[in-house]
Image: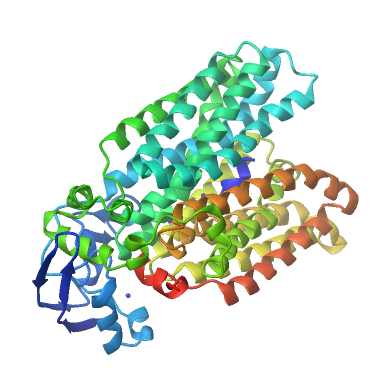
């Protein structure tokens, strides 16, 4: 279960752009010529973002706009494309507006990431606490009830992921975060104060509903408020904080050996970020895309001012209103996801998460402790820390490459590396010639697999899905894909041990390697690159109005 999300972060271009910005929201016509020239030295500071300084090599100051627009969509984008080929746009840097923005999205991304931390923490907290809470609640001999304590979280997450999309469409993104804090807080309190296993299971169910909602709305909110040029970097922060949450659960369990009742404190600690999430979202701006879609133009202006600065309000409103799909069409129903217009992109989202689960991440981490023991690493904490460190390191690398190499290339590289690692693991268990080196080889294979997973298969699907889904189906389609993810995770966990017993771990690993290669073929043929493209641009290509 913990392994499920171990995974969970352009050339020179000089153009003269002459455009008319139609501000439908304000019912005004403004003509604004912009002369934009960007040198190589300026490229690294687009949107106030400079690589090589600050935490994780990232420093975000005032968020500016490219080509005079945060989202670079609509008529302006099309006029640029008429002069420059798609290949040139792929290879060259974004335009930069002479004017500077006084807003910043980074604090609000940080608030949303509390949901990702809680996601990872609740996935990992029971691993260390299970033995001690079983003794305290008198269920040491009842493995069925212990299984319910673990798996109830997944059942709740499935429910939460499906409901999160509808809540986000109806109430908005920030209000859904605030509502999400309710089951997260109550569930944590019930777990921490439980005097019987029934109360604990109820608390785990509520926490599961909470992290299921978080899994849908955290990447959705981040992708909708992030400027195009750094959307990949900021989007991958979601997976990074999931990893941090899992590691936090590991660290929180260290005092258990000296204090068996510490498991209650471990569950109680998660109340703090839950409350902070609700408080932070109360002061965070709503997604401008959702507000414009709801025709709440005045509120959208306030949100844009907070995110990008007051000098960008007119331009961003114009960009969003010119995306007719997001403004003139009503929110989609669940059955619309399977219409001819949207079925392909929705199926891509579901398949990415299915490949993520079928690729064997749960099996690798499940066996990591025994693998490390055979190699002479006796400490379970050391083994978990090594796997967790590989995951965090890979995610940090992925966040720095997301907007440089692109999502699709990282996915292909990731699944290829996972296939090679799985093959090495399979051979280390079965090939007699490698028997003397099986311990070190299995450790190397495990670490390389987790590292490869964290480079693409872990962080990219949650980032890519909100990008490829049209605005009117985005929340529900993300929820559906994540619901499929939780369902497949549940059944894989249910069947894995039986399959392993029947076929042996070596053959199972070989099967995982084959699935990884199939994923490479599928991604090469069906996944589009979204690097450097606005959400409106992607929507017009993948889901054109009929």
Residue lying furthest top: 195
x and y percent of residue 199 in the render?
62, 17
Asked if residue 257 can be seen in this view, the reply is yes
Percent from the top left, x then y, of residue 112?
37, 42
> How many numbered markers are drawn?
0
Give residue 111's quadrant in the image: top left
The answer to whether 401 is drawn above or below residue 161 in the figure is below
Q: Is residue 262 above or below residue 347?
A: above
| Residue found 68% across the figure and 34% down from its top | 151
Is 281 drawn above or below residue 69 in the view shown?
Answer: above
Query: Does 411 sit left or right of 69 as displayed?
Result: right
Q: Which quadrant of the rendered structure holds the C terminus?
A: bottom left
Q: Is residue 442 left or right of residue 37?
A: right
Residue name at image x 85 percent, y 63 percent: 433
Q: Position of residue 289 (x, y in %)?
A: 31, 56
Residue at the right extreme, as displayed: 502
Colour setup of the view? rainbow
Residue ID at (29%, 51%)? 291
In the image, residue 8 lies at what x, y percent? 51, 49
Q: Quadrant of the N terminus?
A: top right
- In the image, residue 215 sits, relative to residue 31, either above or below, namely above
Say whether residue 375 is visible. no
Q: Residue at x 48, y 54 (%)?
A: 395
Q: Is residue 376 left or right of residue 332?
A: right
Q: Nearer the viewer, residue 400 or 489?
A: 489
Which of 204 and 442 lies nearest the eye of the viewer?
204
């Amino acid at each position: 279960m913990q392994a499920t999300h171990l995974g969970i972060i352009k050339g020179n271009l000089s153009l003269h752009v002459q455009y008319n910005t139609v501000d439908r929201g304000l019912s005004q016509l403004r003509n604004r010529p912009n002369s934009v020239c960007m040198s190589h030295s300026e490229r690294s500071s687009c949107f106030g973002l400079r690589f090589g300084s600050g935490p994780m090599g990232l420093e975000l100051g005032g968020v500016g706009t490219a080509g005079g627009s945060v989202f670079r969509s609509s008529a302006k984008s099309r006029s640029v494309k008429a002069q420059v080929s798609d290949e040139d746009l792929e290879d060259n840097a974004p335009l930069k507006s002479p004017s500077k923005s006084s807003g910043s999205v980074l604090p609000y991304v940080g608030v949303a990431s509390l949901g990702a931390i809680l996601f990872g923490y609740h996935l990992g907290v029971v691993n260390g606490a299970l033995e001690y809470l079983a003794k305290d609640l008198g269920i040491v001999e009842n493995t069925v009830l212990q299984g319910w304590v673990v798996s109830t979280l997944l059942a709740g997450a499935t429910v939460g992921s499906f409901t999160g999309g509808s809540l986000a469409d109806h109430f908005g993104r920030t209000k859904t975060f605030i509502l999400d804090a309710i089951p997260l807080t109550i569930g944590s309190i019930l777990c921490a104060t439980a005097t019987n296993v029934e109360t604990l299971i109820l608390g785990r169910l509520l926490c599961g509903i909470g992290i299921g909602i978080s899994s849908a709305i955290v990447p959705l909110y981040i992708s909708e408020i992030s400027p195009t040029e750094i959307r990949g970097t900021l989007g991958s922060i979601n997976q990074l904080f999931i990893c941090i949450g899992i590691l936090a659960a590991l660290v929180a369990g260290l005092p258990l050996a000296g204090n068996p009742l510490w498991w209650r404190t471990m569950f109680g600690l998660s109340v703090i970020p839950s409350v902070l999430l609700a408080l932070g979202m109360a002061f965070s701006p709503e997604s401008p895309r959702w507000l414009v879609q709801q025709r709440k133009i005045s509120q959208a202006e306030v949100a844009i001012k907070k995110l990008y600065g007051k000098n960008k309000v007119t331009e961003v409103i114009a960009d969003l209103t010119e995306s007719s799909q997001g403004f003139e069409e009503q929110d989609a129903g669940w059955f619309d996801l399977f219409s001819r217009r949207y079925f392909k992109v929705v199926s891509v989202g579901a398949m990415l998460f299915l490949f993520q689960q079928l690729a064997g991440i749960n099996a690798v981490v499940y066996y990591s402790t025994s693998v490390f023991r055979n190699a002479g690493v006796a400490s379970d904490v050391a083994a978990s820390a090594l796997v967790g460190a590989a995951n965090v390191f890979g995610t940090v690398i992925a966040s720095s490459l997301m907007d440089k190499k692109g999502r699709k290339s990282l996915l292909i590289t990731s699944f290829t590396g996972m296939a090679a690692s799985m093959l090495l693991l399979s051979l280390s268990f079965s090939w007699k010639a490698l028997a003397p080196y099986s311990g070190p080889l299995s450790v190397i294979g495990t670490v390389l697999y987790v590292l490869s997973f964290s480079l693409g298969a872990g962080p990219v699907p949650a980032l890519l899905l909100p990008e490829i889904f049209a605005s009117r189906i985005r929340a529900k389609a993300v929820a559906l894909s994540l619901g499929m993810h939780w369902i497949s995770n549940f059944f894989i966990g249910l069947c894995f041990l039986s399959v392993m017993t029947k076929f042996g771990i070596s053959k199972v690993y070989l099967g995982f390697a084959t699935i990884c290669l199939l994923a490479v073929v599928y991604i090469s043929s069906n996944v589009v690159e979204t690097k450097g493209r606005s959400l409106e641009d992607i929507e017009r290509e993948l889901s054109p109005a009929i």
